[in-house]
Image (tube, grey):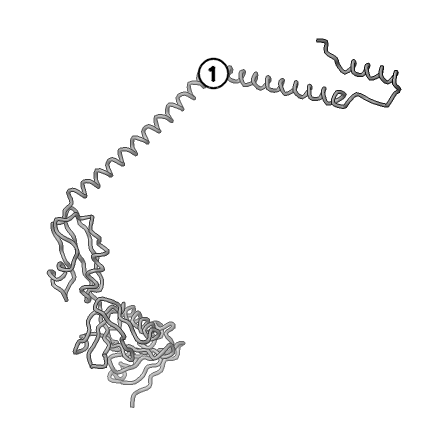
Amino acid sequence: MKKTGRNDDYNELNSLNNELGSFGLEPPKRYRSQQPDDFQNEKMTKQSSKKLRSERSKSNSQMTSAQKNAIHKKKRRLKKKVRIAIGITGLCIALIVAVIVCLIVFCKIETITVNGTEKYTTEQVLAVLPVEKGKNLFLFDSEGAENKLCENLPYIYSVDIKRKLPSTVEVNITQADRLYYIENNEGLYTYIDDNFKTVDVNVSEPTQNGIEIKKIAVSQSVLGQKAEFTDENIADNVKELMTVVNNLKLDEVTAIYSEGNLSNYLVYENRIIIKIGEINNAENKVYSALSAIEKLNEANPQAEGTMTSIGGKQVYFTEQK
């Protein structure tokens, strides 16, 4: 079939114009301009692709044998490192599993030692301790065992249970440095520690070397559990006073009490009331009062009265008449 190009179309259009009259028609633009442009773009794209393939082929052909060998060696080294890493990981996992199996199978409890208890005998502690000889050394709940001892043997302040290979459980007990006591309406006493845990109830006399908590009442007290008070705001202030006593190691303090947020007190050797006012910054206030009491004792070791230290540098003593 004979192809018709742009010139044939143009001549045919001219012939029709001559016979019918010229209507000012021109060949369609797609034949006039677009078709050569598309053809030219397609031709250039093909030439660019061919040139790119040629350059790649030329680059590959120019790579030396040494370069190719270097690339292959690098790949082999990488594969070798991967195989080594996988092997080491597998070996570590196998060792860990073996150790765990050995610990579970072979580490049985043979010895239980108890240290630090004065109030309770070793037999009393072991009777409560939920750990048995012959059981696995690593499968019992040490935290649960510690809590059970503190709840069932209230004079215990804290417990630290340690496992010692191959077959020993060590129970280290700490008792409270000091106890606090509260007198109830029947003239009996309730003992608590500085966490408000009830240590003893309905005792006929104050605990030796204890600190009395005055002007507060216990609404509920169960052995081994936290005591509840009739006024929780007052209880919060008492807790702060306990913290001061512990931090400053005040063995000379015989009582503490609070009458509200603005009125808080410690009693020194049953003869000097330390008034600190607001509970804020209580430790610094008490420290200033103790410095003043030290000087007062040099002049009059039997002095009785109130040492006021409510903040700032002013501390003054009002002697009891």
Rendered image quadrant of residue 298: bottom left
Vertical order, 231 against 305 (above or below): above
Q: Is 41 on the left or on the right of 189, as rendered?
A: right
On screen, residue 104 above or below 146: above
Q: Which residue is rendered at x = 14% and y = 66% of the image?
A: 119
Task: Spot the residue most to the bottom.
Answer: 321
User: Which residue is drawn at the image coordinates 42% and 18% (left, top)?
Assistant: 69
Residue located beneath label 1 in the image:
64
Q: Amino acid at mark 1?
A: Thr
Q: SS for tag 1? A: loop
**Residue 120 falls in which quadrant of the image?**
bottom left
Q: Quadrant of the C terminus?
A: bottom left
Q: Which residue is at a point 22% across and 41% down the rendered structure image?
A: 100
Left of 296 or right of it: where is 15? right
Image coordinates for residue 291, horizontal then vertical, percent: 31, 76
Give the image location of residue 163, x and y in percent.
Answer: 19, 51
